[in-house]
Amino acid sequence: MTYPTTRMRRLRMLPGVRALVHETRVHPANLIMPLFLVPGQKVKSEIPSMPGQYHFSIDTVGEEAQKIYSLGIPAVLLFGIPEEKDESGSHACDEQGIIQKGVAAIKKACPDLVVITDLCFCEYTSHGHCGAIINSQVDNDLTLQMIVNQTISHANAGADMIAPSGMMDGAVAAMRAGLDQGGFTHLPIMAYSAKFCSAFYGPFREAVQSAPQFGDRRSYQMDPANRLEALREVELDIQEGADIVMVKPALAYLDVISAVKEKFGMPTAAYNVSGEYAMVKAAASKGWIDEQRIVVETLTAIKRAGCDIIITYFAVEFAELFRKGLV
Ligand code: PBG
């Protein structure tokens, strides 16, 4: 009988030693909390498809922003549901629009919280697609002009960073040029570079009523099978001027996150999306999993894959655990 000389278990015996050799630590400073804005007053209503997440009106979101900031989370990502949707999503560029007013309200309530705006049209169009429709298809170049208008509108409203999520070709370059010409050379772009056409967005689409009214998003979002194409998408966005690149969703795409970080070494974000959130909440509500442990394990795995930034509906929950010393 021979016995092992190297015993991996030696470093697993004491909590303190385990802490010393712990390779990946998620910190609230790594996280971005998404927020959903709706018209109306005094609204804070739970989103049925995303238990624990809320629709906020402009007058209630400031308080939430302060809470988020006080937990050490540096940034929020804003989504808006307009009063009315139309064919061209015109409300998206309205100076008095939901996002524009929301940015101002949050910056007023909490000036140091980084306010990132999601830039897309699907929440604003009556057909639910992410741009202008010509012959039943989203027209890329017509949408680019609309993207520039929305970009300037968000910048004028006081956004600290803009995140284009529509997967139009050339969006980052168009935005960068628009921002630079408009005097916003300092505003960074966080590009949804490798955004896959995923069933994991289901609960979000219910939350913002943005499910496409015909067809699907396969002509602009990526095929989940494609890793090399994701690298080309990221490379293009970097060439076009993206400051942060993103992979979305996160959990089923950890290999893509890892490849992106290895290859480009860019500040890299991952979006832990609504379906990933809702599945955990659903299983936890049945008592089938331990929610706290799943949250910590999941976020740790996403960071271990190589990203610096995680956009997650669990941001507040994680930061609360962190504050209590439970992480
Ligand atoms: C808008 C957008 C979507 C998400 C973020 N921005 C939905 C979609 O592409 O259909 C999904 C976020 C989530 O599921 O948490 N294009």
Image (cartoon, grey):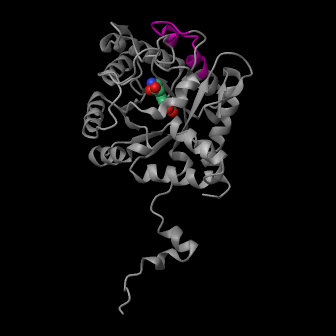
Q: Residue furthest right?
A: 42
Residue 66 place in picture, x, y as percent? 67, 35
Which region of the structure is painted magenta? Answer: 85-102
Dividing the picture into quarters, in which one does residue 280 lie?
A: top right
> Who's the residue at 70% across and 27% down the image?
45
Magenta-drawn stretch contains 92: yes
Residue 293 coordinates in the image, percent (x, y): 59, 55
Which residue is at the front of the view, 61 or 181?
61
The residue shown at (50%, 46%) is 30
Percent of width and height locating residue 290: 62, 54
Residue 99, given in percent of the width and then of the height, sits at: 56, 19
Quadrant of image for the N terminus: bottom left
**Residue 6, picture quadrant:** bottom left
Q: Is residue 199 magenta?
A: no
Q: Would residue 95 be seen by someone viewing this image from the given angle?
A: yes
Give 172 or 231, whichever is nearer the viewer.
231
Q: Is residue 115 visible?
A: no
Is 277 above or below relative to 178?
A: below
Q: Is residue 179 left or right of residue 79?
A: left
Residue at 38 percent of width and 50 percent of height? 306
- Residue at image point 59% right, 30% down: 35
Residue 98 left/right relative to 24: right
